[in-house]
Image (tube, rainbow, N blue to C red):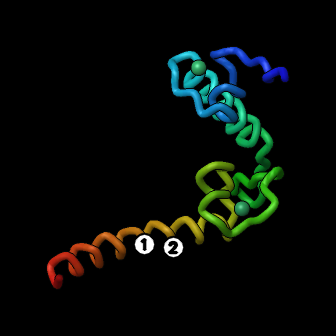
Amino acid sequence: MTKKQWQHGSYYGYNKKGCKCDPCVEAGREYAETWRQRHLESRVLIHGRLVSTTLKIHGTCNGYTNFGCRCISCTAANTEAVLRNRRKKNDSKAAAGAQ
Ligand SMILES: [Zn+2]
Ligand SMILES: [Zn+2]
């Protein structure tokens, strides 16, 4: 019975083992940054908008936020999400007052 060897300060430790020690968190942060950078660099300018070429599904705020996609669908989805969050905040305030 051999356990898979892994080292701290690796994305594996952070992601698979859920380790929250400093080197692992740093590795996870770096991985996310590299991942994000790769997607941001793959964007192309279409009709004056930066559009992601790696994003599969457009029209989500994930596309807008994480992929940096600024196509009309993703921008609209993000705007909608921002408005919804604002409304939700107001709603919860109202609900808290009502209860
Ligand atoms: Zn660790
Ligand atoms: Zn998009």
Mark pair 2, 1: CA separation: 5 Å
Query: Image check: 13 left or right of 52?
Result: left
- Vertical relation: 81 (above or below) 33: below
User: Given the image, on which type of amino acid does mark 2 rest?
Assistant: Glu
Is disc 2 placed on a helix, strand or loop?
Answer: helix
Nearer-the-camera pick, 97 or 8: 8
Res 71 quadrant in image: bottom right
Q: Which of 21 and 36 lies nearest the eye of the viewer?
A: 21
**Residue at 28% over, 74% down:** 92
Q: Is residue 41 above or below residue 46?
A: above
Q: Nearer the viewer, residue 51 or 90?
A: 90
Contact between labelled residues 1 and 2, with CB atoms less than 8 Å apart: yes
Q: Residue at x 17, y 82 (%)?
A: 99
Residue 49 position in % (x across, y down): 69, 57
Q: Residue at x 77, y 46 (%)?
A: 43
Across and down, in percent, residue 36 comes to 68, 38
Viewer-nearest residue: 69 or 49: 69
Amino acid, disc 1: Leu
Label 1 packing within 10 angstroms: few (<14), some (14-19), many (20+): few
Q: Is residue 79 left or right of residue 14?
A: left
Residues packed near mark 2 inside 10 Å, few (<14), some (14 to 19) or many (20 plus): some
In the figure, is residue 84 to the left or right of 67?
left
Q: Which residue is mark 2?
A: 80
Q: Which mark is residue 26?
A: none
x and y, in percent, of residue 95 in the image: 23, 80
* Label 1: element kind: helix
Q: Residue at x 76, y 52 (%)?
A: 52
